[in-house]
Structures are given as C-alpha cells and as structure tokens.
Amino acid sequence: MVGAWIVGLLLVPLLGVALAGPSAADEPATEHIRRTTRRWRWAGLAVGAAVAAVTAGYDPLGRGVLLAAPLFGLCVLAGVVAGESRVVARPACSTRQAALETRQVRHYLPRRPFRAVAAAGTALAVLLAATTAAGSPDGLGRAGRALAYDCGDFIGTHGPWAGSFYSLPLAPLVGLGVLIAALAMHRLVGRPRPQAPAGDMVRDDAERRHSATAVTGACGVLVTIPLIGISLFTAAGLLSSPCRPLWWTAAAWGLFLLVPAWIVLLAWSSVAVLSPGPRADRPAPVSA
Amino acid sequence: MSTPTLRVDTQDPTPPYEQLRRQLSDLMHTGALKPGDRLPPLRQLAGDLGLAVGTVARTYRELEAAGLVRSRRGGGTRVADQAPAPPADGHRQALDRHAAAYLRQAQLLGADRETALDAVRRAWPADA
C-alpha cells in the first residue's frame, strides 16, 4: 500500500513534466530535441525505479527481485520511445525538405556495447533454457524451483534454482524489452530532421546517437541483472551436488568467471542510461 | 558535410512525385548523385517530407522505368551504373525549370524584376 502511494506520488509530477508544452520558438532545434528526449527518458527512469522498488518486495521467493530490473529497463525504453515520438512533428507546412541521405540503425548504435549486450542476451537465453530444462519441483511441489540430483545411494535437491518458476515470468519481459528496443531504434532513425527557424535542416546525429546509447544501456540493465543473479544461483546449484560430473564443475566456474564481465557491462549500461546527453553546442545546418 | 536536399512544395501545381522525380533526375545528371549511390528508403523519405509512401514509391518507379535507378529487394534503390545520358541541353532545361519556379514564387510575393534578381545576387556566394 505504501509502495503504491510512493509510485503515485512520483508518477504525477513526472507525467506533468513529460507532458509539458513544447519549447520556446526561438530555442535551437537540437536543444529542443535534447530537452524533450532527456525529459522523457528521465521520466521513464524514475517510473522504472519506483516500479522496480515496488516489484522487488512483491514476492518473498525472489521473483520480484528477478523481475525488477527488466521492468526498470522496460520503463526506460518506453520513455525513449515516447520522447522520440514527440520530438519532431511530421511536416505539415506547404514547403517541405529532406536531406538525401540513408539513415540506418547501425549509424547510431554504439557498436561494441551493442555486441556485448547481444552476447549477454544470448547467454541469458541459453542459460535460462538449460536451467528450465534441468529444473525440478522443490520440497513444496513448486515446479521448476530446484535442481534434483541422484547420487545412487541418495538423492537430493538444491534450491532456489532458475527453472520454470523463474524463467516463465522473466522470458516474456525480456522479449517485450527487445521488441520495445527495436521500436525505439525504429523511431529514432525514422523521425525527420528538425528545421532551424531560418528553414535550414539541422544535423541531430549526436542526439540520435545518444538515444541509441540509452536504448543499448536500458537493454544492458534489462539483461545483465537477471543474468548475474541466475549465473550465481546456477553455479551454486551445480557445485552443491556431491556427485557432480566434472563438466558441472567446469560450467559452474565458467559462470563465476563471466560474472565480472557482466558487472562491467552493467556499469556501462547504468552510465549510458543515466548520462545527461551531448553538450549543447551550436548545431551544424545540413547544407544544401 | 554537404548533403543534397530535396524540396517539395505542396501548393505547386506539379504533383509531389513529379517534383521529386525532376530533382533526383537533375542530381544524377549533374553528378551530385553518382552510380551506385543509394537513395533514401521509401518510408524514411516519405516520413521526412510528410508524404504518403506511395507518392515516393511512384517517383522511384518512374526513375527505374527511365533506367536511372535500380531497385533490389533488401538492397534498396541505387543509382544505375549506366544511367542514360542527359539530353544535350539537359542542364539548361533544368535551370530554366528552376528559374520558372522561382519566378512564380517571386511574382506571388509581389516582387518586381529587379527585386527578384537582387535576391538571386544576394543569395549567390561571393566566391562562386
């Protein structure tokens, strides 16, 4: 109840800020873009933080904590989509212009971080598939919440384990995040160039690049936090079996060794999401 | 960085697809667009100009029919390697066309001959 009040109190002023009127007419076009996208991104970020805080305490069995990061990432991505959708209106005046250029997603995505986030996403998908397949019911009969092992003389279980109990709610959220990220990239690449008051088109590649970095960062947060948690719990589960085969030990240490890399990626992603954006220098017109 | 710009005037009696076709054709004939250069994707150009995708698609179809561009599924639309040569006085015709359009706008604004020519002189770069 208290959490809902906190979310409500945060939402009202944030929505007010996000839905505030357009910028002054004499404001440089890129400054307007910067301000609008930043406002929406921060609104998504604050709503995401509140939603994550409420979700984290929702389930004592750990599902709330697991889903908090993906929900946070989803809210940030939704903020980016909203900002990019509102930033430049579709031209409606009688004289319209367009630069003869081909804008593509790869022009704006930060290449190496994108590859790292894609690798983390693939690792999460593979790990979730494996842990879901190996999951067993726990002592209270909750499906996919424990790892069962059979040592011949005795059998045992170890939990919590990232089986279907955790993967079934997590997978759709991650999938939805990927879809919203794709929509955000589509929006930021497809929106028209802004026009200066004098009528010249203005290069806003720095703003697009920053939004693409924020999208990559949000995806990084969305993927790496569950990945770190599941890696640690899976490694602990594999090492808990007294009669484990050698490859279980190798896999567990492999997962442990990858965790620092995921933490570095999480740190980069957090900075990318929180970064205020490019500095307000004078935009270069797109010369005809 | 110099990027050619396409302009569409929705109050011009010439249909937007034809305005675009002429401008792109001129850019190819003057060498501003070289063989192999990629034209903007249909949806991007339509979105930038606030036109229907079908309008831009018609422009590209006309250019393809004239042998000026080639379209490939997944590869976009590119300037043809061996585009037909422009007519001998193609540049002059294009210049006359643009001059006529400017004259029409100047007259709509109520400018007389000298005022319109002064505006051209002012717009002309000093070092050109």
Image (spheres, coloured by chain):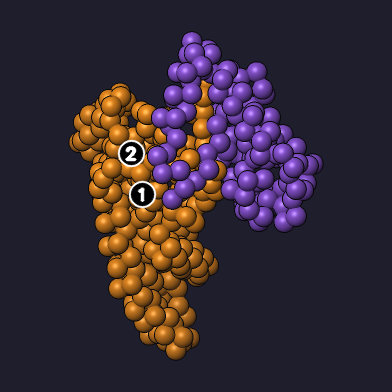
Chain colours: A orange, B purple
- Specify whether A221 is left or right of B99: left
Q: Residue furthest bottom?
A: A246
Q: Position of residue A262 (x, y in %)?
A: 34, 68
Q: Position of residue A65 (x, y in %)?
A: 31, 54
Q: Nearer the viewer, residue B68 or A168?
A: B68
Which residue is rendered at x = 46% and y = 86% of the image? Answer: A247
Task: Provide the chain ID for the residue under circle 1.
Answer: A
Q: Tell me the residue that label 2 is attached to.
A: A30
Q: Is residue A244 visible?
A: no
Name the quadrant containing residue A147.
bottom left
- Secondary structure of the residue carrying numbered label 2: helix
Which residue is rendered at x = 25% and y = 35% of the image? Answer: A7
Task: Provide the chain ID for the residue under circle 2.
Answer: A
Residue type indicated by callout 1: Ala
Q: Is residue A69 visible?
A: yes
Are circles 2 and 1 on residues that touch, CB within 8 Å? yes
Q: Position of residue B74 (x, y in %)?
A: 67, 53
Q: Tell me the residue that label 1 is attached to.
A: A206
- Specify whether B70 is left or right of A173: right
Residue type indicated by callout 2: Thr
Q: Nearer the viewer, residue A220 or B112?
A: B112
Q: Position of residue A67 (x, y in %)?
A: 36, 52
Which residue is rendered at x = 66% and y = 36% of the image? Answer: B92
Q: Nearer the viewer, residue B84 or A15?
A: B84
Quadrant placement of the N terminus of chain A: top left
Q: Residue furthest top?
A: B110
Label 2 or label 1, whichever comes before in sequence order: 2
Which residue is rendered at x = 66% and y = 56% of the image? Answer: B36
As displayed, is residue B100 above or below residue A268? above
Q: Nearer the viewer, residue A149 or B15?
A: B15
User: Callout 1: 10 Å neighbours few (<14), some, many (20+)?
Assistant: some
- The answer to whether marks 2 and 1 sit on the same chain is yes
